[in-house]
Protein backbone atom coordinates (compact mmCIF):
# COMPACT_ATOMS: atom_id res chain seq x y z
CA UNK A 1 0.00 0.00 0.00
CA UNK A 2 1.35 3.42 -0.99
CA UNK A 3 1.99 5.95 1.74
CA UNK A 4 0.64 8.72 -0.52
CA UNK A 5 -1.47 8.18 -3.63
CA UNK A 6 -3.07 10.65 -6.03
CA UNK A 7 -5.30 9.65 -8.95
CA UNK A 8 -7.36 11.47 -11.57
CA UNK A 9 -6.21 14.87 -10.33
CA UNK A 10 -7.33 17.85 -12.42
CA UNK A 11 -6.92 21.58 -11.93
CA UNK A 12 -7.79 24.47 -14.24
CA UNK A 13 -7.32 28.22 -13.86
CA UNK A 14 -10.04 29.60 -16.07
CA UNK A 15 -9.31 28.37 -19.60
CA UNK A 16 -5.79 27.25 -18.65
CA UNK A 17 -5.63 23.55 -17.71
CA UNK A 18 -2.72 22.90 -15.35
CA UNK A 19 -3.60 19.25 -14.69
CA UNK A 20 -6.04 17.01 -16.52
CA UNK A 21 -5.10 13.53 -15.26
CA UNK A 22 -2.39 13.66 -12.63
CA UNK A 23 -1.45 10.52 -10.75
CA UNK A 24 1.33 9.66 -8.29
CA UNK A 25 1.98 6.87 -5.80
CA UNK A 26 4.80 7.22 -3.27
CA UNK A 27 5.86 4.31 -1.08
CA UNK A 28 7.18 4.55 2.46
CA UNK A 29 10.98 4.44 2.47
CA UNK A 30 11.51 5.72 -1.06
CA UNK A 31 12.62 8.87 -2.84
CA UNK A 32 10.18 9.34 -5.69
CA UNK A 33 11.45 11.71 -8.38
CA UNK A 34 8.86 13.86 -10.16
CA UNK A 35 9.89 15.15 -13.58
CA UNK A 36 8.29 17.15 -16.37
CA UNK A 37 8.96 19.98 -18.78
CA UNK A 38 8.27 23.61 -17.89
CA UNK A 39 4.52 24.00 -17.40
CA UNK A 40 3.86 20.25 -17.37
CA UNK A 41 1.91 20.38 -14.10
CA UNK A 42 4.40 18.88 -11.64
CA UNK A 43 4.48 21.98 -9.41
CA UNK A 44 0.68 22.13 -9.37
CA UNK A 45 0.55 18.47 -8.31
CA UNK A 46 2.95 19.17 -5.44
CA UNK A 47 0.98 22.26 -4.38
CA UNK A 48 -2.14 20.10 -4.17
CA UNK A 49 -0.32 17.69 -1.85
CA UNK A 50 0.97 20.66 0.18
CA UNK A 51 -2.54 22.11 0.50
CA UNK A 52 -1.79 25.44 -1.19
CA UNK A 53 -3.96 24.51 -4.21
CA UNK A 54 -7.34 22.73 -4.17
CA UNK A 55 -7.92 20.24 -7.03
CA UNK A 56 -11.07 20.46 -9.16
CA UNK A 57 -11.36 16.66 -9.26
CA UNK A 58 -9.48 13.56 -8.16
CA UNK A 59 -8.64 11.51 -5.11
CA UNK A 60 -5.87 11.84 -2.51
CA UNK A 61 -5.16 8.89 -0.21
CA UNK A 62 -2.78 8.61 2.74
CA UNK A 63 -2.15 5.07 3.98
CA UNK A 64 -5.04 3.98 1.78
CA UNK A 65 -7.56 6.37 3.37
CA UNK A 66 -9.18 9.19 1.34
CA UNK A 67 -8.32 12.64 2.68
CA UNK A 68 -9.20 16.24 1.88
CA UNK A 69 -6.28 18.65 2.08
CA UNK A 70 -8.05 21.94 2.66
CA UNK A 71 -4.92 24.05 3.20
CA UNK A 72 -1.27 24.08 4.36
CA UNK A 73 -2.30 23.68 8.00
CA UNK A 74 -4.38 20.62 7.10
CA UNK A 75 -1.44 19.19 5.12
CA UNK A 76 0.84 19.55 8.15
CA UNK A 77 -1.78 17.89 10.35
CA UNK A 78 -1.86 14.96 7.90
CA UNK A 79 1.93 14.57 8.15
CA UNK A 80 3.10 16.37 5.01
CA UNK A 81 6.19 18.60 5.09
CA UNK A 82 7.34 20.80 2.21
CA UNK A 83 10.52 22.46 0.99
CA UNK A 84 9.49 25.31 -1.30
CA UNK A 85 11.62 26.29 -4.30
CA UNK A 86 10.59 29.90 -3.66
CA UNK A 87 11.89 30.24 -0.11
CA UNK A 88 9.21 31.06 2.48
CA UNK A 89 11.39 32.43 5.25
CA UNK A 90 10.84 35.31 7.66
CA UNK A 91 13.87 37.48 6.86
CA UNK A 92 14.02 39.38 10.17
CA UNK A 93 13.54 36.30 12.37
CA UNK A 94 16.35 34.06 13.57
CA UNK A 95 17.40 30.75 12.06
CA UNK A 96 15.93 28.94 15.08
CA UNK A 97 12.60 30.78 14.74
CA UNK A 98 12.34 29.95 11.04
CA UNK A 99 13.14 26.28 11.56
CA UNK A 100 10.33 25.94 14.09
CA UNK A 101 7.90 28.44 12.60
CA UNK A 102 5.41 25.92 11.12
CA UNK A 103 5.02 24.21 14.50
CA UNK A 104 6.14 26.48 17.35
CA UNK A 105 6.44 24.72 20.73
CA UNK A 106 4.05 26.41 23.16
CA UNK A 107 3.69 26.61 26.93
CA UNK A 108 0.11 25.92 27.97
CA UNK A 109 -0.91 26.95 24.47
CA UNK A 110 -0.26 30.62 25.21
CA UNK A 111 3.42 31.50 24.84
CA UNK A 112 6.27 30.19 22.73
CA UNK A 113 8.45 27.80 24.71
CA UNK A 114 11.80 29.37 23.86
CA UNK A 115 13.82 26.62 25.53
CA UNK A 116 12.05 23.86 23.61
CA UNK A 117 12.38 25.90 20.42
CA UNK A 118 16.15 26.23 20.86
CA UNK A 119 16.51 22.49 21.59
CA UNK A 120 14.49 21.54 18.50
CA UNK A 121 16.41 23.98 16.28
CA UNK A 122 19.80 22.88 17.62
CA UNK A 123 18.97 19.24 16.91
CA UNK A 124 18.10 20.07 13.28
CA UNK A 125 21.08 22.40 12.73
CA UNK A 126 23.42 19.68 14.02
CA UNK A 127 22.47 17.50 11.05
CA UNK A 128 24.45 19.92 8.86
CA UNK A 129 27.34 20.50 11.24
CA UNK A 130 30.51 21.45 9.35
CA UNK A 131 28.87 22.50 6.06
CA UNK A 132 26.72 25.50 7.03
CA UNK A 133 29.53 28.06 6.64
CA UNK A 134 30.66 31.11 8.60
CA UNK A 135 28.06 33.13 10.45
CA UNK A 136 25.42 30.39 10.50
CA UNK A 137 24.10 30.12 14.04
CA UNK A 138 20.71 29.52 15.62
CA UNK A 139 20.56 33.19 16.61
CA UNK A 140 21.55 34.66 13.24
CA UNK A 141 18.78 36.47 11.36
CA UNK A 142 17.93 35.05 7.96
CA UNK A 143 18.58 38.36 6.16
CA UNK A 144 22.24 38.16 7.25
CA UNK A 145 22.80 34.78 5.54
CA UNK A 146 24.12 33.87 2.09
CA UNK A 147 21.81 32.30 -0.50
CA UNK A 148 23.06 28.75 0.21
CA UNK A 149 22.60 29.25 3.95
CA UNK A 150 19.03 30.49 3.48
CA UNK A 151 18.30 27.41 1.41
CA UNK A 152 19.67 25.24 4.21
CA UNK A 153 17.28 26.94 6.64
CA UNK A 154 14.34 26.08 4.36
CA UNK A 155 15.51 22.45 4.21
CA UNK A 156 15.90 22.38 8.00
CA UNK A 157 12.38 23.75 8.39
CA UNK A 158 11.01 20.85 6.34
CA UNK A 159 13.11 18.29 8.20
CA UNK A 160 12.13 19.67 11.62
CA UNK A 161 8.49 18.87 10.87
CA UNK A 162 9.38 15.16 11.15
CA UNK A 163 6.57 14.58 8.67
CA UNK A 164 6.10 11.05 7.28
CA UNK A 165 5.70 12.57 3.78
CA UNK A 166 8.20 15.17 2.57
CA UNK A 167 8.22 17.19 -0.67
CA UNK A 168 11.51 18.70 -1.86
CA UNK A 169 11.13 21.06 -4.85
CA UNK A 170 14.61 21.87 -6.24
CA UNK A 171 16.21 21.73 -2.77
CA UNK A 172 19.85 21.76 -3.93
CA UNK A 173 19.82 24.62 -6.47
CA UNK A 174 21.92 26.99 -4.30
CA UNK A 175 23.97 24.42 -2.35
CA UNK A 176 27.63 23.54 -2.81
CA UNK A 177 28.84 19.97 -3.27
CA UNK A 178 29.60 19.34 0.42
CA UNK A 179 26.16 20.61 1.43
CA UNK A 180 24.47 18.41 -1.20
CA UNK A 181 26.38 15.34 -0.03
CA UNK A 182 25.37 15.96 3.58
CA UNK A 183 21.74 16.52 2.59
CA UNK A 184 21.69 13.28 0.60
CA UNK A 185 23.14 11.40 3.58
CA UNK A 186 20.25 12.72 5.65
CA UNK A 187 17.77 11.69 2.93
CA UNK A 188 19.16 8.15 2.89
CA UNK A 189 18.79 7.94 6.66
CA UNK A 190 15.18 9.13 6.39
CA UNK A 191 14.53 6.39 3.83
CA UNK A 192 15.77 3.82 6.33
CA UNK A 193 13.22 5.17 8.81
CA UNK A 194 10.36 4.77 6.37
CA UNK A 195 9.80 8.35 5.21
CA UNK A 196 8.12 8.85 1.83
CA UNK A 197 9.72 11.64 -0.20
CA UNK A 198 8.87 13.44 -3.43
CA UNK A 199 11.97 14.97 -5.02
CA UNK A 200 12.06 17.49 -7.90
CA UNK A 201 15.43 18.34 -9.44
CA UNK A 202 16.88 19.37 -12.80
CA UNK A 203 20.22 17.67 -12.11
CA UNK A 204 20.40 14.20 -13.60
CA UNK A 205 23.41 13.17 -11.51
CA UNK A 206 21.49 13.98 -8.32
CA UNK A 207 18.39 12.15 -9.52
CA UNK A 208 20.43 9.04 -10.24
CA UNK A 209 22.24 9.30 -6.90
CA UNK A 210 19.20 9.69 -4.62
CA UNK A 211 16.08 8.52 -6.48
CA UNK A 212 14.36 5.12 -6.43
CA UNK A 213 11.51 5.65 -8.92
CA UNK A 214 10.57 8.42 -11.33
CA UNK A 215 7.17 9.64 -12.48
CA UNK A 216 6.98 11.79 -15.61
CA UNK A 217 4.23 14.35 -16.19
CA UNK A 218 3.61 15.80 -19.63
CA UNK A 219 0.98 18.38 -20.60
CA UNK A 220 -0.94 17.92 -17.34
CA UNK A 221 -1.07 14.11 -17.52
CA UNK A 222 1.01 11.43 -15.83
CA UNK A 223 2.85 9.55 -18.58
CA UNK A 224 4.18 6.73 -16.43
CA UNK A 225 6.37 5.59 -13.54
CA UNK A 226 9.64 3.64 -13.80
CA UNK A 227 12.38 2.36 -11.52
CA UNK A 228 15.40 4.60 -12.08
CA UNK A 229 17.65 1.54 -12.13
CA UNK A 230 15.72 0.27 -15.16
CA UNK A 231 15.84 3.42 -17.31
CA UNK A 232 18.25 6.14 -18.42
CA UNK A 233 18.35 9.91 -18.81
CA UNK A 234 17.69 9.96 -22.57
CA UNK A 235 14.60 7.78 -22.17
CA UNK A 236 13.21 9.95 -19.36
CA UNK A 237 13.70 13.14 -21.37
CA UNK A 238 12.06 11.54 -24.40
CA UNK A 239 8.99 10.80 -22.25
CA UNK A 240 9.02 14.38 -20.94
CA UNK A 241 8.96 15.96 -24.39
CA UNK A 242 6.65 13.39 -26.01
CA UNK A 243 8.35 11.15 -28.51
CA UNK A 244 6.04 9.55 -31.07
CA UNK A 245 6.78 6.11 -29.61
CA UNK A 246 7.05 6.05 -25.82
CA UNK A 247 7.35 2.29 -25.44
CA UNK A 248 10.38 0.91 -23.59
CA UNK A 249 11.56 -0.82 -26.75
CA UNK A 250 11.73 2.44 -28.68
CA UNK A 251 15.11 3.42 -27.30
CA UNK A 252 16.97 2.16 -30.36
CA UNK A 253 14.86 4.36 -32.60
CA UNK A 254 15.27 7.52 -30.58
CA UNK A 255 16.38 10.55 -32.63
CA UNK A 256 19.99 11.48 -32.88
CA UNK A 257 21.19 14.88 -31.79
CA UNK A 258 19.59 17.56 -33.96
CA UNK A 259 16.68 15.40 -35.21
CA UNK A 260 13.38 17.20 -34.63
CA UNK A 261 10.80 15.92 -32.19
CA UNK A 262 8.33 18.66 -33.08
CA UNK A 263 5.41 18.31 -35.45
CA UNK A 264 5.88 20.34 -38.66
CA UNK A 265 3.59 23.13 -37.47
CA UNK A 266 5.55 23.51 -34.21
CA UNK A 267 9.03 23.66 -35.74
CA UNK A 268 11.19 26.71 -35.21
CA UNK A 269 11.56 29.59 -37.65
CA UNK A 270 14.03 29.54 -40.50
CA UNK A 271 17.16 30.46 -38.62
CA UNK A 272 18.67 33.83 -39.42
CA UNK A 273 22.28 33.51 -40.48
CA UNK A 274 24.43 35.41 -37.96
CA UNK A 275 26.02 38.56 -39.35
CA UNK A 276 29.58 39.70 -39.05
CA UNK A 277 31.29 41.60 -36.28
CA UNK A 278 30.09 44.90 -37.72
CA UNK A 279 26.43 44.17 -36.84
CA UNK A 280 26.95 42.89 -33.30
CA UNK A 281 24.57 44.89 -31.13
CA UNK A 282 25.79 43.49 -27.83
CA UNK A 283 28.93 41.51 -26.98
CA UNK A 284 29.06 39.91 -23.51
CA UNK A 285 32.22 38.29 -22.14
CA UNK A 286 32.86 36.66 -18.74
CA UNK A 287 29.77 38.19 -17.13
CA UNK A 288 29.19 37.24 -13.51
CA UNK A 289 26.57 38.27 -10.99
CA UNK A 290 23.90 37.03 -8.61
CA UNK A 291 23.30 33.37 -9.49
CA UNK A 292 25.38 33.15 -12.68
CA UNK A 293 28.99 33.15 -13.80
CA UNK A 294 31.16 33.29 -16.96
CA UNK A 295 28.35 34.25 -19.36
CA UNK A 296 29.53 34.97 -22.91
CA UNK A 297 27.54 35.61 -26.09
CA UNK A 298 26.99 37.98 -29.00
CA UNK A 299 23.59 39.14 -30.21
CA UNK A 300 23.38 40.62 -33.71
CA UNK A 301 21.14 43.29 -35.13
CA UNK A 302 17.99 41.64 -36.47
CA UNK A 303 18.49 38.50 -34.39
CA UNK A 304 16.28 36.95 -31.70
CA UNK A 305 18.63 35.19 -29.27
CA UNK A 306 16.81 32.84 -26.89
CA UNK A 307 17.68 31.99 -23.30
CA UNK A 308 16.42 28.49 -22.49
CA UNK A 309 16.64 25.93 -19.71
CA UNK A 310 14.64 25.27 -16.60
CA UNK A 311 13.29 28.14 -14.53
CA UNK A 312 15.70 29.88 -12.17
CA UNK A 313 19.01 28.92 -13.78
CA UNK A 314 20.27 32.49 -14.11
CA UNK A 315 18.46 33.65 -17.26
CA UNK A 316 16.45 36.44 -15.62
CA UNK A 317 19.39 37.50 -13.47
CA UNK A 318 21.59 37.96 -16.56
CA UNK A 319 18.96 40.15 -18.24
CA UNK A 320 18.41 42.25 -15.11
CA UNK A 321 22.18 42.69 -14.74
CA UNK A 322 22.52 43.83 -18.35
CA UNK A 323 19.79 46.38 -17.62
CA UNK A 324 21.60 47.63 -14.50
CA UNK A 325 18.91 46.40 -12.09
CA UNK A 326 21.33 43.93 -10.46
CA UNK A 327 25.06 44.41 -9.79
CA UNK A 328 27.71 42.58 -11.78
CA UNK A 329 30.76 40.94 -10.22
CA UNK A 330 32.77 40.24 -13.38
CA UNK A 331 32.86 40.69 -17.13
CA UNK A 332 32.46 43.18 -19.95
CA UNK A 333 29.59 44.27 -22.18
CA UNK A 334 30.50 46.08 -25.40
CA UNK A 335 29.30 47.26 -28.77
CA UNK A 336 32.36 47.24 -30.95
CA UNK A 337 35.08 48.92 -28.91
CA UNK A 338 32.58 50.89 -26.79
CA UNK A 339 31.72 49.68 -23.32
CA UNK A 340 27.98 49.37 -22.85
CA UNK A 341 27.97 48.06 -19.31
CA UNK A 342 25.42 49.90 -17.20
CA UNK A 343 25.22 50.31 -13.45
CA UNK A 344 21.65 51.60 -13.28
CA UNK A 345 18.47 51.18 -15.39
CA UNK A 346 18.54 54.93 -16.12
CA UNK A 347 21.98 54.57 -17.67
CA UNK A 348 20.88 51.49 -19.64
CA UNK A 349 17.86 53.32 -21.05
CA UNK A 350 20.02 56.22 -22.25
CA UNK A 351 22.38 53.74 -23.91
CA UNK A 352 19.52 52.23 -25.91
CA UNK A 353 18.83 49.10 -23.83
CA UNK A 354 15.19 48.20 -23.13
CA UNK A 355 13.92 45.65 -20.59
CA UNK A 356 10.47 44.08 -20.37
CA UNK A 357 9.66 41.86 -17.38
CA UNK A 358 6.93 39.23 -17.16
CA UNK A 359 6.29 40.48 -13.62
CA UNK A 360 4.42 43.57 -14.72
CA UNK A 361 3.22 44.41 -11.20
CA UNK A 362 6.78 44.54 -9.85
CA UNK A 363 8.66 45.89 -12.87
CA UNK A 364 6.08 47.23 -15.30
CA UNK A 365 2.83 49.07 -14.70
CA UNK A 366 2.36 52.12 -12.48
CA UNK A 367 -0.73 51.02 -10.60
CA UNK A 368 -3.64 53.44 -10.34
CA UNK A 369 -2.23 55.88 -12.91
CA UNK A 370 -3.60 56.68 -16.41
CA UNK A 371 -2.53 54.67 -19.44
CA UNK A 372 -0.75 57.68 -20.95
CA UNK A 373 1.43 58.03 -17.83
CA UNK A 374 2.33 54.35 -18.12
CA UNK A 375 3.30 54.80 -21.76
CA UNK A 376 5.55 57.87 -21.54
CA UNK A 377 8.22 57.55 -18.79
CA UNK A 378 10.89 56.11 -21.12
CA UNK A 379 10.19 58.83 -23.72
CA UNK A 380 10.56 61.52 -21.03
CA UNK A 381 13.85 60.04 -19.86
CA UNK A 382 15.41 59.52 -23.29
CA UNK A 383 14.32 62.92 -24.59
CA UNK A 384 15.10 64.65 -21.26
CA UNK A 385 11.68 66.30 -21.29
CA UNK A 386 10.42 68.57 -18.52
CA UNK A 387 7.10 69.63 -20.06
CA UNK A 388 5.09 68.29 -23.00
CA UNK A 389 1.64 68.76 -24.53
CA UNK A 390 -0.71 65.81 -23.80
CA UNK A 391 -1.95 65.80 -27.42
CA UNK A 392 1.60 65.45 -28.73
CA UNK A 393 2.33 62.61 -26.28
CA UNK A 394 -0.83 60.76 -27.28
CA UNK A 395 0.08 61.07 -30.93
CA UNK A 396 3.49 59.51 -30.29
CA UNK A 397 1.96 56.75 -28.16
CA UNK A 398 -0.83 55.85 -30.59
CA UNK A 399 1.37 54.12 -33.17
CA UNK A 400 3.02 51.98 -30.50
CA UNK A 401 -0.22 50.77 -28.90
CA UNK A 402 -1.80 50.20 -32.32
CA UNK A 403 1.10 47.97 -33.37
CA UNK A 404 0.21 45.65 -30.48
CA UNK A 405 -3.58 45.78 -31.05
CA UNK A 406 -4.00 47.15 -27.53
CA UNK A 407 -7.63 47.42 -26.43
CA UNK A 408 -8.46 50.39 -24.20
CA UNK A 409 -11.17 53.04 -23.90
CA UNK A 410 -8.91 56.08 -23.68
CA UNK A 411 -5.48 57.29 -22.63
CA UNK A 412 -6.93 58.89 -19.49
CA UNK A 413 -8.30 55.61 -18.14
CA UNK A 414 -6.38 53.90 -15.32
CA UNK A 415 -4.01 51.08 -16.27
CA UNK A 416 -5.88 48.87 -13.78
CA UNK A 417 -8.94 48.95 -16.05
CA UNK A 418 -7.13 46.81 -18.64
CA UNK A 419 -6.77 43.04 -18.79
CA UNK A 420 -3.40 41.53 -17.90
CA UNK A 421 -2.53 41.04 -21.57
CA UNK A 422 -3.34 44.64 -22.47
CA UNK A 423 -1.38 45.92 -19.47
CA UNK A 424 1.65 44.01 -20.75
CA UNK A 425 1.12 45.47 -24.22
CA UNK A 426 1.26 48.95 -22.70
CA UNK A 427 4.52 48.04 -20.93
CA UNK A 428 6.07 46.91 -24.23
CA UNK A 429 4.64 49.85 -26.18
CA UNK A 430 6.40 52.37 -23.91
CA UNK A 431 9.75 51.06 -25.21
CA UNK A 432 8.74 51.38 -28.87
CA UNK A 433 7.98 55.11 -28.86
CA UNK A 434 11.73 55.78 -29.00
CA UNK A 435 13.27 52.73 -30.64
CA UNK A 436 15.96 51.02 -28.53
CA UNK A 437 19.05 49.26 -29.89
CA UNK A 438 18.65 46.11 -27.78
CA UNK A 439 15.41 44.69 -26.37
CA UNK A 440 15.71 42.37 -23.34
CA UNK A 441 12.56 40.26 -22.84
CA UNK A 442 12.36 38.52 -19.46
CA UNK A 443 9.55 35.94 -19.80
CA UNK A 444 7.33 38.70 -21.24
CA UNK A 445 4.16 36.63 -21.83
CA UNK A 446 3.84 35.24 -18.31
CA UNK A 447 0.19 35.27 -17.21
CA UNK A 448 -1.38 36.60 -20.41
CA UNK A 449 -3.85 34.93 -22.80
CA UNK A 450 -3.03 33.20 -26.07
CA UNK A 451 -4.35 36.01 -28.30
CA UNK A 452 -2.16 38.57 -26.51
CA UNK A 453 0.84 36.26 -26.83
CA UNK A 454 0.26 35.95 -30.56
CA UNK A 455 0.13 39.74 -30.93
CA UNK A 456 3.34 40.16 -28.92
CA UNK A 457 5.34 37.64 -30.91
CA UNK A 458 4.07 38.94 -34.23
CA UNK A 459 5.46 42.34 -33.23
CA UNK A 460 8.70 40.89 -31.83
CA UNK A 461 9.42 39.09 -35.11
CA UNK A 462 8.61 42.27 -37.06
CA UNK A 463 11.01 44.28 -34.88
CA UNK A 464 13.76 41.72 -35.53
CA UNK A 465 13.15 41.89 -39.29
CA UNK A 466 13.52 45.66 -38.92
CA UNK A 467 17.01 45.18 -37.46
CA UNK A 468 16.38 45.30 -33.69
CA UNK A 469 18.56 42.99 -31.58
CA UNK A 470 16.39 40.97 -29.17
CA UNK A 471 17.30 38.68 -26.27
CA UNK A 472 14.33 36.53 -25.23
CA UNK A 473 14.03 34.42 -22.11
CA UNK A 474 10.85 32.36 -21.95
CA UNK A 475 9.77 29.62 -19.54
CA UNK A 476 7.66 28.17 -22.37
CA UNK A 477 9.58 25.94 -24.78
CA UNK A 478 7.24 26.60 -27.72
CA UNK A 479 7.90 30.35 -27.52
CA UNK A 480 11.65 29.84 -27.81
CA UNK A 481 11.50 27.13 -30.45
CA UNK A 482 8.98 29.09 -32.49
CA UNK A 483 10.74 32.46 -32.41
CA UNK A 484 14.44 32.33 -31.51
CA UNK A 485 17.17 32.11 -34.15
CA UNK A 486 19.55 30.58 -31.60
CA UNK A 487 18.94 29.27 -28.07
CA UNK A 488 21.50 29.36 -25.25
CA UNK A 489 20.57 26.69 -22.70
CA UNK A 490 21.27 27.63 -19.06
CA UNK A 491 21.89 25.25 -16.18
CA UNK A 492 23.30 26.13 -12.78
CA UNK A 493 24.02 29.74 -13.73
CA UNK A 494 26.08 28.85 -16.81
CA UNK A 495 25.45 28.47 -20.53
CA UNK A 496 25.70 24.74 -21.21
CA UNK A 497 24.90 24.53 -24.90
CA UNK A 498 23.95 26.58 -27.96
CA UNK A 499 21.17 25.27 -30.20
CA UNK A 500 20.98 26.61 -33.75
CA UNK A 501 19.42 25.51 -37.03
CA UNK A 502 17.96 22.01 -36.93
CA UNK A 503 19.30 21.49 -33.40
CA UNK A 504 16.51 23.72 -32.06
CA UNK A 505 14.30 20.87 -30.83
CA UNK A 506 12.48 20.29 -27.58
CA UNK A 507 14.47 17.10 -27.00
CA UNK A 508 17.80 18.89 -27.34
CA UNK A 509 16.53 21.74 -25.15
CA UNK A 510 15.82 19.39 -22.26
CA UNK A 511 18.81 17.18 -22.95
CA UNK A 512 21.03 20.22 -22.29
CA UNK A 513 18.89 21.58 -19.44
CA UNK A 514 19.12 18.31 -17.51
CA UNK A 515 22.83 17.80 -18.22
CA UNK A 516 22.12 14.40 -19.75
CA UNK A 517 24.88 14.69 -22.34
Image: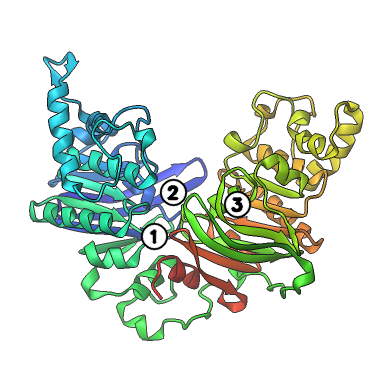
Q: Is residue 35 above or below residue 146?
A: below
State how far apart marks 3 and 2 are (Cα): 28 Å
Helix, strand or loop at mark 3 = helix
Corner quadrant of residue 459? bottom right
77 sits to left or right of 510:
left
Q: Nearer the viewer, mark 3 or mark 2?
A: 3
Residue 18 numbered mark, or none: 2
The quadrant of the rendering that contains the N terminus is: bottom left
10 sits to left or right of 336:
left
Q: Is residue 50 visible?
A: yes
Q: Nearer the viewer, mark 3 or mark 1?
A: 3
Question: Residue 284, image x and y in percent?
Answer: 63, 62
16 sits to left or right of 196:
right
Q: Nearer the viewer, residue 5 or 89?
A: 89
Residue 36 numbered mark, or none: 1
Question: Residue 321, image x and y in percent?
Answer: 59, 49
Pointer 3 residue: 319
Contact between marks 1 and 2 (CB within 8 A): the answer is no
Crowd class of label 3 (few under 14; some 14 to 19; many from 20; radius 10 Å): many
Corner quadrant of residue 210? bottom left
Crowd class of label 1 (few under 14; some 14 to 19; many from 20; radius 10 Å): many
State how far apart marks 1 and 2 are (Cα): 12 Å
The residue under the point 44% across, 58% down is: 219
Corner quadrant of residue 295? bottom right
Helix, strand or loop at mark 1 = strand
Query: In terms of sequence position, does the residue under pointer 3 or pointer 1 come before the other?
Result: 1
Query: In terms of sequence position, does the residue under pointer 1 or pointer 2 come before the other?
Result: 2
Crowd class of label 2 (few under 14; some 14 to 19; many from 20; radius 10 Å): many
Query: In terms of sequence position, does the residue under pointer 3 or pointer 2 come before the other?
Result: 2
What scheme was used to colour the molecule?
Answer: rainbow
Q: Nearer the viewer, residue 321 or 225?
A: 321
Helix, strand or loop at mark 2 = strand
Amino acid sequence: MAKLELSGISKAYGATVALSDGALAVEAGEVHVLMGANGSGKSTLCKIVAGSVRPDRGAVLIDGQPVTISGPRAARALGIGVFYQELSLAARRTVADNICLPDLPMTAGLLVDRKALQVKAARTIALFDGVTGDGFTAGATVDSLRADQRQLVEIMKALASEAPVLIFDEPTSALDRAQVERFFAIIRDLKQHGRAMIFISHRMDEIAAIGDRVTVIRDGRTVGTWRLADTDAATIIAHMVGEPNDSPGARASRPHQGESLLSPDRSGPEARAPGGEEDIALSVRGLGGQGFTDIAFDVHEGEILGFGGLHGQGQSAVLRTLFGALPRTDGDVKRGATSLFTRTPREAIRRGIAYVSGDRRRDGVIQGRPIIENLMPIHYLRQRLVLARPSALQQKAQAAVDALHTKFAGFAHAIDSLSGGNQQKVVIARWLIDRPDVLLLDDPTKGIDLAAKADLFTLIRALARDGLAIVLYSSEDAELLGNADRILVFNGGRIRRELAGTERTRYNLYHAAYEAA
